[in-house]
């Protein structure tokens, strides 16, 4: 039985503390300053550490990192969802929270709950921006309260297979502040996630459940090494997190490109081709003797480059059985032999670069006799066509 990798988006929340704890734990790292909103000249301090010296117990580390993990409640037009977030930056009057994009997807308002010494505080949050492809989003809370800030580890080479780790989150949306312990099981693990695509992630056996999305994965020094985002629901101990090095780049880009509440931040370099791909079996030619697997666009975004350049998706067939749609044969002269090939090739295309997509028309033939004469069968045309355009920058909208 095929097992799908699922993203944890139910009710999760994590607050991670900064890495300046007490006399027993010292942060010798630095703060990375980011200038956003040129009209306001707001300086955001992203907390990144190069070295934390630990001279205390794991229990003390957990005690001090937990306050940086927050509950996030997202409200859409007909839904309420919850997830986790980590406070990782601050300005003079605000705190910035990193989470997964799928935690806040399609929502228009947000509530953040922080915990400190068993006391909870609720804040209204605003969306700074996000990236579905990176599965990263950023929220902002304005408050004069003092909140705890976590520090990212700045060097991925410091993360090794076998490193002890702790995950903090809110499993099932009712168990906030739950701490689990495990190890780093693998690094740069290529994983396919529904509605996102392929990601290179940290694999861990720390117990993670629905509700942990957007939460934190720490090493035992209290350094934030990953943002939890997925796991196999059918297996225990097979869970994943976005590496800190990747999360830092996405966070910085989103914050830097943010303009105001109507101009959201985005990850620079991500393309706006706007195709949702699927695969299926159809007949290889008009003889209707043999079948082959094809990759096609099940949907093209009206704001995307593919749609604007006339690439026909499956809706042409769905709405009019006698209109054609396209089977992708190559992307930038790289052959597409299966769904995985196509996904990887599209994800690797950068904004402002030329895109060349070759395709064959999917045609239709009536076949059969008697009452079956009305049956229409799709088959692959023999002619190869090409469409060429420049990929634009993906701009985040809601």
Image: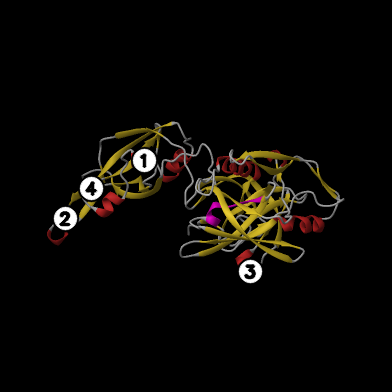
Q: Is residue 22 left or right of residue 96?
A: right
Position in image of residue 155 (x %, y %): 70, 39
Q: Nearer the viewer, residue 285 or 171?
A: 171
How far apart marks 4 and 1 lie (CA) works out to 18 Å
Position in image of residue 341 (x %, y %): 44, 41
Label placed on residue 100? none
Residue 208 visible? The answer is no
Where does label 4 land, which residue?
Answer: 323
Residue interval drawn in magenta: 95-104
118 is higher (above) or lower (below) than 281: below
Where does label 1 land, which residue?
Answer: 306
Give the crowd class for mark 1: few <14, some 14-19, many >=20 residues within 10 Å.
Answer: many
User: Considering only order in the chain, which callout, 1 or 4, is on the residue closer to the N terminus?
Assistant: 1
**Which is closer to the viewer, label 4 or label 2?**
4
Position in image of residue 97 (x %, y %): 63, 52
How far apart marks 3 and 2 lie (CA) works out to 58 Å
Label placed on residue 368? 2
Q: Secondary structure at mark 2?
A: loop
Could you tell me how many numbered marks the image carries? 4
**Which is closer to the viewer, label 2 or label 1?**
1
Where does label 3 land, which residue?
Answer: 174
**Which is closer to the viewer, label 3 or label 2?**
3
């Amino acid at each position: 039985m095929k097992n799908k990798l699922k993203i944890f988006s139910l009710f999760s929340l994590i607050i991670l503390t900064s890495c300046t704890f007490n006399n027993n734990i010292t942060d010798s790292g630095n703060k990375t300053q980011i200038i956003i909103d040129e009209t306001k000249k707001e300086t955001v301090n992203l907390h990144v550490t190069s070295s934390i010296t630990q001279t205390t117990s794991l229990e003390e580390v957990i005690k001090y990192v937990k306050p940086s993990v927050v509950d996030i409640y997202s409200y859409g037009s007909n839904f309420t969802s919850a997830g986790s977030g980590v406070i990782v930056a601050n300005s003079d009057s605000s705190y910035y929270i990193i989470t997964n994009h799928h935690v806040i997807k399609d929502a228009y308002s947000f509530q953040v709950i922080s915990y400190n010494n068993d006391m909870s505080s609720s804040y209204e949050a605003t969306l700074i921006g996000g990236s579905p492809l990176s599965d990263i989003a950023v929220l902002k809370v304005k408050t004069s309260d003092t909140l705890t800030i976590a520090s990212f580890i700045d060097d991925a080479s410091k993360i090794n297979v076998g490193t002890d780790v702790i995950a903090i989150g809110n499993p099932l949306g009712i168990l906030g502040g739950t701490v689990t312990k495990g190890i780093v099981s693998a690094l740069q693990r290529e994983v396919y996630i529904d509605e996102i695509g392929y990601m290179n992630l940290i694999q861990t056996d720390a117990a993670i459940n629905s509700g942990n999305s957007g939460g934190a994965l720490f090493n035992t020094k209290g350094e934030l090494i990953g943002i939890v985002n997925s796991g196999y629901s059918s297996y225990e101990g097979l869970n994943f997190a976005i590496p800190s090095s990747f999360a830092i780049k996405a966070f910085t880009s989103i914050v830097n490109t943010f303009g105001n509440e109507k101009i959201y931040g985005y990850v620079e370099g991500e393309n706006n081709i706007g195709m949702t791909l699927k695969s299926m079996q159809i007949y290889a030619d008009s003889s209707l003797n043999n079948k082959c697997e094809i990759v096609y666009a099940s949907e093209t975004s009206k704001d995307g480059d593919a749609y604007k350049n006339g690439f026909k998706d499956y809706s042409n067939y769905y709405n009019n059985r006698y209109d054609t749609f396209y089977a992708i044969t190559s992307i930038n002269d790289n052959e597409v032999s299966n769904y995985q090939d196509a996904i990887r090739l599209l994800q690797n295309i950068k904004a402002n670069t030329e895109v060349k997509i070759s395709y064959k028309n999917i045609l239709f033939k009536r076949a059969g006799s008697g009452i079956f004469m009305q049956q229409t069968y799709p088959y692959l045309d023999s002619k190869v066509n090409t469409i060429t355009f420049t990929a634009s920058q993906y701009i985040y909208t809601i």
